[in-house]
Image (cartoon, rainbow, N blue to C red):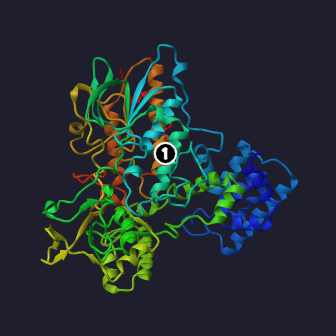
């Protein structure tokens, strides 16, 4: 027995310690964990079950007295289990189903059980492991695959392909893994999804510092995962793929790769997994005079630590997700801060968004190591639909309001009430109130820091449009000059340029960007007609807005790509290209689905839409729909050669 195990056993006999740990836990995953450890499923009482209609309400239908009772019940069961000396229980399939019934409601278990089992991924299990291995297909079976990008998506793809025994080479333009979490180092950078969920099902850990991890912690997780899985031996760093070209005769891809010293080489592969991501190419606004500003200027995605901000006049252009994180971090250092806002964001109240877990929570994880697994599953269930229902358009709703349904209007009223409680100044409040329906564009997690920063006496939230950047600052449309020493752009990313700056040429020499014509589409967000054996991750219409974690979607995409390769090789063919009719039918489904969502109908600038006005980012349905559609690739959807 290891030291941690001995500490856990001895700790379970300490009633005070157990009580403190249980107090730090969420009640419902706590009850599930204790039921799993002790085998006492009577803990899962119907009167303590979460109310499935109140998943977004604290307590999930339980009042404070019920929550206290549940924690006492769990603590007593743990003490009794420790006193008995019995080993931790292993749930049977039937018992696990009973726990699911308690957590998600008996009516949902039948539909969700397989998905929930994958997400739970109890220690020692790997439900999403490839169903095949190359060495089992015969000695003639070969497949060499390039993975482009070593961010989270690329690491997941490399791991699964290696599990299948595929020869994998990962090309990464940077000097280390991490992708957007390596490149974005601005102050306050952190994830807006609970990190138990913003992590791989196959690489879970209890070593999180906070519920919403900061950039250094996420980067450490990704780098640690790559090291633990031995992925480094498959990665070529400082190697940027500038071009990928399919050879119709050879049925293979050639990649042009530029090394850090500028030299180039061409290599051949049977297939490509494109994992270049979306949020890593900065977008600058089309404002006249940007090049004239004589002071330091930079984009938040290329933060310049060499520029001192203390005591200086700083202008920030943009009030999106990045600005909402870095502005509160620098507000106390600068002499003056002008924040230029085109569209105010909706702020989702998130208590303790930037705070670390209390010591009692880490003690809980030492006492109950599997709590992290159940907590992950609970976070997944809370977000599997999340606020999706509040983003759906009610065609009977009054179109002249700033909402699209009764649920959307309820959320709007709630968020305005929260903002009003944070902002006393009437003029500032009016500037900060969005006049578009919630979720039409990205809503931002906030624990009150944004309003507090905007309310500081040396801060001005400027809503007059910018006319031009001058040598000494910013001139707004009313003719007013706003002097600045430093200019920071918090204006987001070129999210619609899915493979930029790489050029991809498919069958017949057709370039992917020409195929798209600035309007990217892909079947399941993964494959495009005429581009055989080319699989995209985080491609068109796979972004999740308010109902889950992108890493859940990525794992679905990775499984689809790996299983598709396996089925291709079993079929005896060498390449697969999505049928155009399948692709077009799916594209219409995405358009129709997004037309029923607030981001598809609201008149507000958003990176969810491309220059053609079409929503190319968002998945408009629930997570189960995508999971089920990517579970088993159908070769009938493809032309084989």
Please state which of residues 194 and 346 is positioned toward the viewer in this rendering: 194
Residue furthest bottom as drawn? 425
Left or right of 198? Residue 573 is: left
- What residue appears at the point 47 percent right and 47 percent down from the top-left corner? 551
Please state which of residues 360 and 417 is positioned toward the viewer in this rendering: 360
> In the displayed structure, would residue 17 be above or below residue 163?
below
Q: In what quadrant of the picture does the N terminus appear?
A: top right
Q: Position of residue 633 (x, y in %)?
A: 46, 32
> In the displayed structure, would residue 528 be above or below residue 334?
above
Figure quadrant of residue 312:
bottom left
- What residue appears at the point 33 percent right and 86 percent down from the top-left corner? 426
Determine the secondary structure under disc 1: helix
Q: In what quadrant of the picture does the C terminus appear?
A: top left
Label 1: few (<14), some or many (≥20) within 10 Å?
many
Residue furthest right as drawn? 84
- What residue appears at the point 60 percent right and 56 percent down from the top-left corner? 378
Q: Position of residue 419 (x, y in %)?
A: 41, 78
| Residue carrying label 1 | 223
Left or right of 415? Residue 540 is: left
Kindly tell me whether residue 633 is visible in this rendering.
no
Please state which of residues 607 and 144 is positioned toward the viewer in this rendering: 144
Q: Position of residue 447 (x, y in %)?
A: 47, 71
Kindly tell me whether residue 531 is visible in this rendering.
yes
Figure quadrant of residue 404:
bottom left
Q: Position of residue 277 (x, y in %)?
A: 36, 45
């Amino acid at each position: 027995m290891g030291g941690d195990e001995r500490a856990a056993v001895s700790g379970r006999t300490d009633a005070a310690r157990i009580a403190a740990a249980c107090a730090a836990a969420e009640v419902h995953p706590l009850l599930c964990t204790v039921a799993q450890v002790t085998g006492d499923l009577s803990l899962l009482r119907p009167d303590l079950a979460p109310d499935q209609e109140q998943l977004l309400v604290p307590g999930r239908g339980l009042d404070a007295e019920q929550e206290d009772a549940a924690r006492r019940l769990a603590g007593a069961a743990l003490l009794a289990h420790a006193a008995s000396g019995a080993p931790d229980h292993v749930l049977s399939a039937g018992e696990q189903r009973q726990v699911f019934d308690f957590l998600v409601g008996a009516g949902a278990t039948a539909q969700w059980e397989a998905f929930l089992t994958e997400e739970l991924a109890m220690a020692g299990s790997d439900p999403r492991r490839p169903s095949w291995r190359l060495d089992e297909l015969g000695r003639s079976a070969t497949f060499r695959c390039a993975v482009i990008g070593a961010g989270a998506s690329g690491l997941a793809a490399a791991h699964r392909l290696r599990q299948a025994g595929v020869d994998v080479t990962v090309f990464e333009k940077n000097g280390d893994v991490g992708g957007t979490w390596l490149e974005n180092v601005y102050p306050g950078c952190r994830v807006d999804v609970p990190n138990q969920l913003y992590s791989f099902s196959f690489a879970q850990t209890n070593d999180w510092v906070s519920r919403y991890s900061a950039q250094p912690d996420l980067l450490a997780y990704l780098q640690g995962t790559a090291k633990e899985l031995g992925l480094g031996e498959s990665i070529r760093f400082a190697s940027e793929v500038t071009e990928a070209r399919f050879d119709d005769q050879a049925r293979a891809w050639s990649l042009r790769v530029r090394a850090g010293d500028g030299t180039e080489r061409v290599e051949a592969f049977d297939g490509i997994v494109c994992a270049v991501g979306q949020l890593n190419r900065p977008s600058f606004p089309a404002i006249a005079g940007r090049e004239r500003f004589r002071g330091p200027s930079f984009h938040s995605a290329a933060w310049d630590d060499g520029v001192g901000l203390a005591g200086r006049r700083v202008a920030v252009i943009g009030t999106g997700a990045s600005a909402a994180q870095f502005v509160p971090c620098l507000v106390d250092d600068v002499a003056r801060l002008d924040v230029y806002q085109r569209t105010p964001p909706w702020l989702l109240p998130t208590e303790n968004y930037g705070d670390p877990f209390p010591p009692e929570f880490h003690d809980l994880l030492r006492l109950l190591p599997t709590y992290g697994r159940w907590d992950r599953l609970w976070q997944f269930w809370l977000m599997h639909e999340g606020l999706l229902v509040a983003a759906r358009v009610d065609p009977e709703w009054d179109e002249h309001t700033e909402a699209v349904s009764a649920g959307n209007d309820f959320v709007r009223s709630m968020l305005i009430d929260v903002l009003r409680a944070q902002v006393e100044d009437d003029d500032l409040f009016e500037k900060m109130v969005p006049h578009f329906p919630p979720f039409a564009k990205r809503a931002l997690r906030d624990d009150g820091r944004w309003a507090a920063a905007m309310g500081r006496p040396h801060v001005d939230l400027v809503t007059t449009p910018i006319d031009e950047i001058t040598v000494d600052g910013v001139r707004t449309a009313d003719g007013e000059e706003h002097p600045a020493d430093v200019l920071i752009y918090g204006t987001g990313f070129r999210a619609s340029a899915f493979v930029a700056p790489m050029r991809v040429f498919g069958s017949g020499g057709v370039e992917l960007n020409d195929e798209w014509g600035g309007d990217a589409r892909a079947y399941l967000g993964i494959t495009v007609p005429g581009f055989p054996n080319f699989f995209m991750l985080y491609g068109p219409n796979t972004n999740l807005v308010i109902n889950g974690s992108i890493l859940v979607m990525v794992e679905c995409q990775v499984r689809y790509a790996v299983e598709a390769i396996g089925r291709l090789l079993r079929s005896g063919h060498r390449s697969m290209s999505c049928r155009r009719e399948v692709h077009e039918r799916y594209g219409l489904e995405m358009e129709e689905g997004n037309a029923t969502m607030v981001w598809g109908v609201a008149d507000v600038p958003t990176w969810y839409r491309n220059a053609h006005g079409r929503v190319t980012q968002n998945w408009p349905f629930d997570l189960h729909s995508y999971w089920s559609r990517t579970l088993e690739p159908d070769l009938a959807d493809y032309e084989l050669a």
